[in-house]
Image (cartoon, helix red, strand yellow):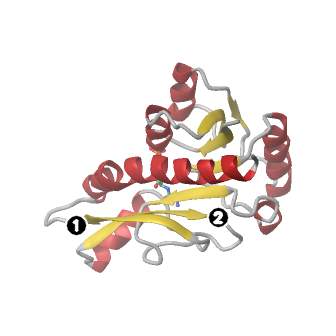
């Protein structure tokens, strides 16, 4: 049986698209969950024929949000959770329920430019402000420390003269994130599939 994957999103969903396009072998995307309505990631799921639901983070307590998320994950019999541009930090009580079963993609070479407050363009703004010549992306397991779980894959990307945060973000996505995330998801999906045999 293929590993059943839920992809959690909050925005445009280009990493979700990379997972859809990768045609995973050991895993299947069984559910997309968005923490926000009206994001393009939901349209991508719809076009690919994947069940997609919105569990709004805004106006909800962390506890109520996570309870609704757990219920959905159970209803869809999810084995592996992938955070792909998901902007909510999950509590320790949530992450403890899924040890080594939650992956996240972060747009820097962890431990640089990571942790609370570092997300999306802010990560690239910080890298440019510090003047690093190399940045990149990291896929890691999620534990109770934001961006602190075990690293699975990393890829470096060069910073070029004249880069803006937007230009650098695009290069990191194209040269690292969209390759790394499907690779890591395939690796972990295969391990889970073999474990359950
Ligand atoms: C991606 O660059 C992802 O690495 C980043 O948000 C973007 C989402 O884009 N995630 C974080 O910063 C998490 N801390 P997408 O919606 O197009 O996949």
Say which mark, if any, is on residue 159. Answer: 1
The residue located at (46%, 50%) in the rendering is 183
Q: Earlier in the sequence, mark 1 or mark 2?
A: 2
Seen in the picture, residue 184 relative to 156 is either above or below; the reply is: above
The local secondary structure at tag 2 comes to loop
Image height of 88 relative to 109, above or below:
above
User: Which residue is pictured at 50% across the width and 72% down the height?
Assistant: 114
Q: Which residue is drawn at 22% across and 66% down?
A: 159
Q: Nearer the viewer, mark 1 or mark 2?
A: 2
Q: Is residue 1 left or right of residue 25?
A: right
CB of mark 1 within 8 Å of CB of mark 2?
A: no
Q: Is residue 21 visible?
A: yes
Q: Which residue is drawn at 71% across and 60% down?
A: 90
**Residue 142: assigned label:** 2
Establish if 119 lies above or below 5: below
Using the rendered view, name the quadrant where residue 73 is placed.
top right
In the rendered image, residue 52, in percent from the top left (x then y), is placed at: 66, 29
Q: Which of 189 and 172 is in front in this view?
A: 189
């Amino acid at each position: 049986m293929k590993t059943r994957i839920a992809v959690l999103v909050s925005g445009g969903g280009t990493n979700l698209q990379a997972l859809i396009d990768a045609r995973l072998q050991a895993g299947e995307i069984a559910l997309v969950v968005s923490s926000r309505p009206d994001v393009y990631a939901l349209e991508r799921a719809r076009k690919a024929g994947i069940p997609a639901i919105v569990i709004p983070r805004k106006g909800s307590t962390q506890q109520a949000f996570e309870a609704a998320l757990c219920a959905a994950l159970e209803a869809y019999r999810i084995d592996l959770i992938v955070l792909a541009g998901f902007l909510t930090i999950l509590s320790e009580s949530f992450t403890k329920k899924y040890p080594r079963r939650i992956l996240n993609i972060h747009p820097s070479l962890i431990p640089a430019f990571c942790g609370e407050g570092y997300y999306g363009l802010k990560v690239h703004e910080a890298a440019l402000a510090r003047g690093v010549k190399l940045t990149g992306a990291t896929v890691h397991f999620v534990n109770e420390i934001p961006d602190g779980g075990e690293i699975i894959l990393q890829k470096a990307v060069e910073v070029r003269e004249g880069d803006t945060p937007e230009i650098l973000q695009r290069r990191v996505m194209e040269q690292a994130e969209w390759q790394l995330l499907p690779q890591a998801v395939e690796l972990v999906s295969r391990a889970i599939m073999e474990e359950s045999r």
